[in-house]
Structures are given as structure tokens and as C-alpha cells.
Amino acid sequence: MDNRNKFWKGVLVGALVTAFAGLIIIGMAAGIWVVGRGVMRNQAYGIADHQATPSEVTLDVERISQKMELIQGIIKERYLFDEDPEMVEDGIFMGMMAGLGDPYSSYYTEEDFQDLMDNSINGEYCGIGALISQNRQTMVMEIMRVFDGTPSAKAGMLPGDMITAVDGENVVGMELDLVVNNYIKGEADTEVTVTVYRESTEEYLDLVMTREKIETPTVEHEMLEDHIGYVLVSQFEGVTAEQFIAAVEDLESQGMEKMIIDLRNNPGGLLDAAVEMAAYLLPDGTIVRTEYKNGTGDEYFSKDGELQASSTAGTRLSQYPIPDDHELDIPMVILVNGNSASASEVFAGAMRDYDRAELVGTTTFGKGIVQSVIPFTGGDAIKLTTAHYFTPDGFDLHGKGLEPDVEVELDGEMTYLINVDPENDNQIRTAVETLKEME
């Protein structure tokens, strides 16, 4: 118990240190409401404090600029060490995004953004072969799945392990995509040490592994008894829709009459992959729509054998071919849980709204908002929450999630899904029973 308390105390401290390091050490101007007031109260430098109110919708740029100049003068006059202007500037921008209070909005330095683009999600990379999820409130990174035969499996990593450091550097509180792309991924045949906290044994473990080229198996499938096809989708990447379509076609060739789609612990990913999968299964119509701050939005829909998207702002978006104008009208169940998020919820919501599937499991995470990455000419970028998702029937799931039609908790001894075992997985058994009742 003491070790567990130490872990969560360490998580809290680590998250606070990471979150505020950029503000306090290299970005004091951005964290002025945290640090500046103490300075202003103790020393009169001629600029009054300003008490912001919730009704204010714009920043007083001139006042902020004046205070930044004031603080810069103090730094120049009294700061003991050498100032790194580039780090200070990055800290200001990080602080501005942190000030939104939105865990999904962030600032990427030029280096971070370049690394992110170089390692964009495409289903193939040099890494460790583990699926990692992050709690956006605590920022704790947790291993959800370890793929067989990968470096993480060989090193003894287990679902439920919580990542605390990579190569000795504390990563608690950092954003997941930066940790994965800038720390965990790397060149093939290079070593990386991932430090995890394992709650079951209350210990920290340094797991040393050699990076390999990973072809992420985002979709797996098998035929169960009674002609029930089972398809596991672990995440939505660039290759997922293609893999999903191939899995469904293979199961159809084996005589599939009913289908279970497993989205448990699927944290989401690419929206395009989710809507293309839904369009492959559904009749013509809206799959998902988004709404922006100004009331405009985008609508993704299938029509005449193509997945299309249009914008109420008058902009034509993308369209994708759907193989053979495919539609699948058989009894279907989608397995979900509290870690099914974002694109998973878009897919599940559309399938249920069209009465093509029932949801079995527990209430989904409830992330129904869109993030847009906006690059700048200097090479840096911001990720900003810009819109809401709505299911075809107009349900805004953000903060609520999708409640299952049949609620069933996973048995305690199977808290984490390592390998699918239909006979011992009580949620899969319930899904099978639900399918039989749908006949």
C-alpha cells in the first residue's frame, strides 16, 4: 500500500512539475497569473494587476505585452543564469495553450511537430509494439495491449503497466503522442528503456527492449461457433479500414451470419478510418457530422458507393470509394467499454443510430470533440479543439459517452484484454447471447 501511495504521489508531483516547468522556468510571461502577481504585490513597477472575468472573450494584448516587457526587464536585470530566448518563447506559447484548460489542446515546438509528422500514424513504424492509452485528467499513460512477438512482449511488458520514464527521463504529465513519437519510437535495432509502475506487484520496472519495425495489427478476426464472425479493432489508423474490409470479406466467404465488432480499449485515431468502415456496412446516409464555433460544420455520408464529405461553409471535402457499394445487414453487436473513445464512439454511434448494431459492455469514454492541427510558417504548430461530433441522430456524446444496450462488466480477473478467449470472456459470451436474441 505504501508503494501504491508513493506511485500516485509521484504521478501528481511529476505531472505538476512537467506541466508547470515550461511556465515557471522558461515561460514566466505565459504563467503571469501564477507567478507575476507575487512579484507585483512585492515590488511596484507601475503596471496594475488585472482581474480577468469569465465574461471576457478576448485577451488584452497591449496590457499583456506591457507586462511581458516588464518581466523581461526583471529577468534581464536579476535572473542569475543565462536566458535562452527560444525556450522562453516556446514556454509562452505552451502557457497560452495550457491556459485554455483543455487537455486536448497543446502547442508543438518546431522539433516536436516535425517528429510528429515524420512518425505520423500509418500502421508501420520502428517501436516496441504496445498499445498505449492516456487518461486526459491524470495524464497517466497505461499499456492497454501488448502485441505478440514484439519487443514489448519479449521484455515482459503487461497490460496495466503505467509508463513513468523513458531512457531515464521522467515523462509523467507529457502528452502521449509526443512521448510515443519523440521518446519511444526510434531507429530500428536501437535500445530503449521504458520504466513502468506495475500496480499488481507495487514495483517499478526498467524494461529494456530493442526497437523493431512494427506492422501494427489494428484488425484481427476469427469465426466463432454458430457462424458468428468476430472482429477486433484495436485502433483506427491509416491501414485500419482496409484491414477491416478484408476481415469482413474473409468472414463472409466462410459463411458469416452474425458479427461481433470489438472496440473495447480502442482509444480512437483517424476519423476517416472510422467513417469509411461505417460506410462499408451502412446504407446511404449521414455517418457523422461536426459543428464548429460559428455554426458551420462538416458532414460525412455515404452515397452511391462512395464515402463523401461536405461542408456547410461551402467547401467540398474528401471522398473515398467503397468496395462494390457494400452494405451488410446482419445481426451485429459492438463491444465497448470506458476506454472506447473518439473514433470508436463515432463508429458505434452511427451503427446504433441506423439500428444495425446493439452495444454491449459498459459506457464509452465520452470524447465527442474534434482537434485540428494548425501549422505555422515557422515550423511549429498548435493542436486545438475546434468542433463537436454528432451522431446521425444528432446525439452529442461528449462528456456523456454511449450507454450500452446491454450493460455487463468484464469479470474482475480479466480486467485487461491480452488475448481474446471467447469461452472465458464474459462480455463476448453476452454479445453472443444478445445476437441469438436478435434473430
Image (cartoon, rainbow, N blue to C red):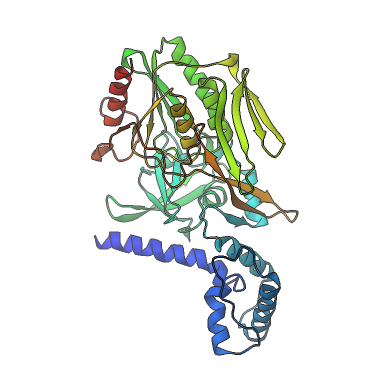
- Pick the residue in front: 367 or 113: 367
Q: In this view, does 387 lie to the left or right of 66?
A: left
Where, quadrant-wise, is the N terminus in this rendering? bottom left
Residue 252 location (% of width, % of height): 45, 12
Q: Nearer the viewer, residue 387 or 110?
A: 387
**In which quarter of the view is residue 300 placed?**
top right
Q: Residue at x 31, y 55 (%)?
A: 203
Q: Where is 127 relative to 275, above or below?
A: below
321 vs 413, nearest the viewer:
321
| Side of 207 where 98 appears, left or right | right
Task: Please state the total of marks drawn on the protein image.
Answer: 0
Q: Where is residue 319 in the image (x, y as percent from the top left)?
A: 66, 27
Q: Is residue 217 visible?
A: no
Q: Residue at x 26, y 25 (%)?
A: 423
Q: Looking at the image, which residue is at 40% across and 48% down?
A: 142
Residue 112 image point, x, y percent: 62, 54
Which corner quadrant of the image does residue 145 belong to?
top left
Q: Residue furthest right?
A: 377
11, 211: nearer the viewer: 11
Query: What is the quadrant of the C terminus in the image?
Result: top left
**Which residue appears at 64% of the width and 80% of the height?**
71
Whether residue 306 is visible: yes
